[in-house]
Image (cartoon, rainbow, N blue to C red):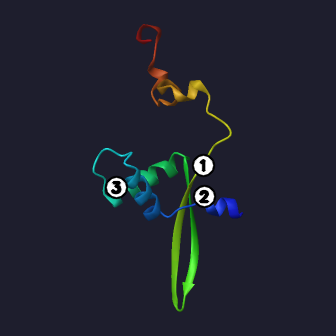
Amino acid sequence: MHVRNASEMTSEEMFKNIMGLGIIKVALEFKEFEQVLETLIYDGKVEKTGRVSSKGEIIDVVYKYRSVNSPITSAGAVRIPCGVCPVIYRITKQHS
């Protein structure tokens, strides 16, 4: 459990680290960075967890993020556009 907790960071910590490394070559606001994180969550690449901390009467939820390494990769047929295209049934021999 300690290793798992050590691999988590808040979005602010992650933003500071990534911007400090200089690996992003465009100007990026913090809100835009959080949108990228949300996209990575939906893609299953990042996991978001919430911790409730109580300071006196103030209850605060702290969200932390960590990378998710999937042990199973998707099949090649799924990664190509036709594998997920909703109009695949329209393809005929003359269009392929």
- Residue 30 is left or right of residue 3, and the answer is left
- Label 1 Cα neighbours within 10 Å, binned few <14 / some 14-19 / many ≥20: few
Outermost residue toward the left in this view: 27
Vertical position of residue 3 compared to residue 26: above or below:
below
- Residue type, numbered disc 2: Ser
> Going 45% across and 53% down the picture, which residue do you hit?
37
Q: Position of residue 3 (x, y in %)?
A: 68, 59
Front residue of 48/1: it is 1
Q: Tell me the residue that label 1 is attached to.
A: 68
- Residue 72 is left or right of residue 48, and the answer is right
Identify the disc placed on residue 58.
none
- Residue type, numbered disc 1: Val
> Going 31% across and 44% down the picture, which residue do you hit?
25
Secondary structure type for disc 3: helix
Q: Position of residue 34 (x, y in %)?
A: 40, 58
- Label 2 Cα neighbours within 10 Å, binned few <14 / some 14-19 / many ≥20: few
Q: Earlier in the sequence, mark 1 or mark 3?
A: 3
Q: Earlier in the sequence, mark 2 or mark 3?
A: 2
Q: From the image, which quarter does the C terminus lie in?
A: top left
Instruction: Report, in whole angstroms, how far the alpha carbon at label 2 lies from the one at label 1.
Output: 10 Å
Q: Tell me the residue that label 3 is attached to.
A: 32
> Going 51% across and 79% down the picture, which residue do you hit?
60
> Going 47% across and 8% down the picture, which residue do you hit?
93
Secondary structure type for disc 1: loop
- Residue type, numbered disc 3: Glu
Q: Tell me the residue that label 2 is attached to.
A: 7
Vertical position of residue 1 compared to residue 68: above or below:
below
Q: Earlier in the sequence, mark 2 or mark 1?
A: 2
Outermost residue toward the right in this view: 1
Q: Position of residue 54 (x, y in %)?
A: 56, 84
Front residue of 2/72: it is 2
